Image: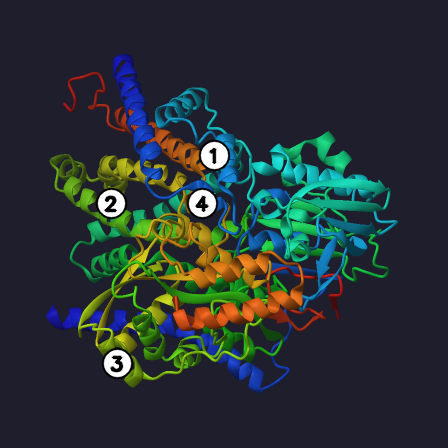
Amino acid sequence: MKKKLSILFALLLSFTLVLSACSSGKSEKSSAGSSEKGKEENPVKDRGNEIVIGVTAEPQNWDPIDTFLLDWSTVATSVFEGLVDRTLDLKLQPGLAESWEYLDDNTLQFKLRKGVQFHDGEPFNADAVKFTFDRLLGPEGQKGPQYANYNSIDHVEIVDEYTVNLKLKSKDPVLLTKLAGYGAVIVPPKYVQEKGDEFFNNNPVGTGPFKMTGYKRDQEIVLEKNPNYWKKGLPKLDKVTFKVIPESSTRLAELQTGKIDIMKRVEVAQSKTVKESSFLELKDVGTPTVYSMRFDTAKKPFDNKQVRQAINYAVDKDAIIKDILSGYGKSISTYQSELSFGNNPDLKPYKYDPEKAKKLLKEAGVKEGTQIDLFIPGNDATFKEIAQAVSFYLEEVGLKLNINSVDSTTLISDLIPNGKAGHMYRQGWGGWTLDFDNTAYLMYSEGQKWNPSFKDAKVAELLAAERSTVDQKEREKIFKELTEVLYDLAPELNLYQAVDLYAVNKRVQNFQPPHEDRMRLEEVSVK
Amino acid sequence: MIAYVIRRLLHTVLVVFAISLLIFFSIRLTGDPVTVMFSAGEPTKEAIEEVRRNLGLDQPLYVQYLIFLKGLVTFDFGESFRSHMPVMDLIMERAGATLALAIGGTIVSILIAFPVGIISAVKRGSIVDFFGRIFSLIGISFPNFWLGIMLILIFAVNLKWLPSSGFEGPQHLILPSITLGMILSGILARLVRSSMLEVMNQQYVSTAKSKGISDWAVIIKHAFRNALLPTITFLGLQFGSLLGGTVIVETIFSWPGIGRLIIDAINQRDYPVIQGGVIFLAVIMVVVNLIVDLSYSLIDPRIKTGGSGRA
């Protein structure tokens, strides 16, 4: 009987091996396919002049004043437009306004574009702009997260049908870039008033290149060409469908079988499979999001600058980027990306120098074997690996890192604000205005929810200074000084700027991956 | 019988009340929805207070709880913080998909587990039984995310027979049902096997055999019918929890079910959706439980629900 059993176990083992070979064999097969070019046939046939995009999630609510989610912007950038727009390389450009100028410090005048229509046929004009901002700044807007971003605006004054003045309560140096943000896209007054807010949540109407014609919650969003779009000859596609596919392996399967044409959020581990396919293309793009381990400067020994600097010297960031992120990440010197206004390219990230780290720790009187608590979100497998690497580096300089994985929402909304996230915690941030102002205020200004303990008189002075002027040259100078001060104070272990990966079927032409998730699809076509 | 049903219904009310207390207070211990909502901006204190007022979060806890209780009685759980849609609508939108998957998974598990369990029991100790038991063990120990992804790779990517995600036609139901059914069938097959073994040692089975009834007729008509009882209990409870959604399977196959709704709501601290969703599931579980108990008396006339219990 025993012999029989061992034979059976052997059989079972081989069955399992065969099964697992099926899975890994798949990528090997596709790799063979690509070396014998042309053997792999593009599975997308007869889709016509339309594309399907696989995304991770949808916002559940399309009203621009109710959201701050990147998932909203991926889709809604094609539906709504603001007075000011950003190009794919994030430069500000005229949107629904043709031009603008400051009449005085508190009055910003916009000349509006003529002949623009909302998807429901309503005309775009000064009334629509006034309605949009009255709604954003009124009771309806105050229920949502966007209101606070625009409360430097007092009210909108109509000068004539195509001219409006934004009257400001205070100077706001980042107002223009904010006007390219989610909350300030222009909505149709008649439609919103007649149909009501709840209907608008599910059936959004804007002036953008595509109109939303279908929405199945958590499943798919269908956009169709806006035939009256004000940019002549655009958009080129007739239809775009967004399919919500949360699991990345499933998204990749859908891409490989031709059910979708573009895949958002390709994981580093999947990049090889995409590159080896003859009909797919991998596109990478730097994002504004940076990841760091921030120190709680109220806790010993991190109240000491030398200790914080020592940790920056102790960790080999380049190795982490190369080995764990397969090179899909960029090193950073302060807590912002190269895309942020105020980034200082002259500052170079702390070099990997464990000897110097040991020296600094010794000078600061930190004993060998000192225990450090790190809090990270439990849903980020890649970052868990990074935390383990950091733990290894810290052990090399005599520190013991305890990694605590916690629920990410609890970390962000409870533990960090209340100073309960250990000595160090992971924080990722992009700064939605693409101006260091947003990040710097949130992280270093006293009393902000994500700044449980950091304070520094010089930093506070510089933050106030950059907000008190709209002269961008002057602000750049202030940010240069601010970044130098922050670099020296080292309030965080700066790790990397995130790089997003997209996989695209080669039938899709002119698709450029967006830096900040806002897909721009009007120039996209298919062959 | 009627007294029993009434007693059980009162019991149900008590359970739902206890769950309402538990869910209401426990979610309020894990972070603030307004902080989550504002995570991108720099809201002023006034703005935060305004939002709190609008969402009713400025009220004392007991008032908020009473409002929730009132909603519970009228089946109105309020509006989602995030989508501003009535919570009941959000749940009902997903009820179809969840029901379809629960039925699909249960059918697959029955189709696999009953034959495996019965044959294993009948051919006890044989090589067939051994394989049956190994199969059960695999079913129980396979992580369903792994199985789901494997099925996608084999049947969608390589063989191109079936779609890998979505909720469109009956063919979309196949892979998620198999994933769910395989996992369930492991436990179910073991259960069928052990109850069959127990029943087959009973005297009436031997009597039936001695009357010269064919082997399979004895197994199906006499043994299996009696072995069904514990199986039905298990299936009923399992079906109840499947209606609660199966987050992992729903995520892998982009299935718009209730499980994903609740998990998303938890991540966003969308209190009304979490409360409504959990209460909805609790009610379903309790009702299914009741139906299972009542169905006993249909399968086994010896069981009276009146009071004297098993004969």
Same chain for mark 3 and mark 1? The answer is no
> What is the chain identity of the residue bearing mark 4?
B
- Density class for disc 3 (Cα within 10 Å; few <14, some 14-19, many ≥20) is many
Specify the amino acid type for callout 3.
Lys
Note whether residue A22 is visible: no
Q: Quadrant of residue B11?
A: top left
As rendered, which of B73 and A480 lies closer to the eye? A480
Residue at the spot of label 2:
B192
| Res A358 label | 3
Quadrant in which the N terminus of chain A appears: bottom left
Give the distance between the C-alpha atoms of the residues marked 4 and 3, in whole angstroms.
39 Å
B64 sits left or right of A136 in the view: left
Which of the chains bears the disc numbered 1? B
Circles 2 and 4: CB distance less than 8 Å?
Answer: no
Rendered location of residue B91, percent (x, y): 49, 35
Classify B218 as above or below A363. Answer: above
**Residue at 45% in and 33% down:** B272
Residue drawn at point x = 77 percent, y = 49 percent: A207
- Indicate the position of residue A125 as horizontal and vertical percent values: 82, 43
Q: Where is residue A514 in the image (x, y as percent from the top left)?
A: 63, 65
SS assignment at label 2: helix
Mark toward the start of the polypeptide (2 vs 4): 4
Circle 2: residue type: Val
What separation in Å lies between label 3 and label 1 (alpha carbons)?
A: 48 Å
Disc 4 target residue: B35
Query: Three-letter amino acid code at disc 1?
Result: Arg
Q: Earlier in the sequence, mark 4 or mark 1?
A: 4
Left or right: residue B186 versus residue A443 is: left
Residue position marked by numbered label 1 in the rendering: B52
Q: Considering the image in quadrants, where does the C terminus of chain A appear?
A: bottom right
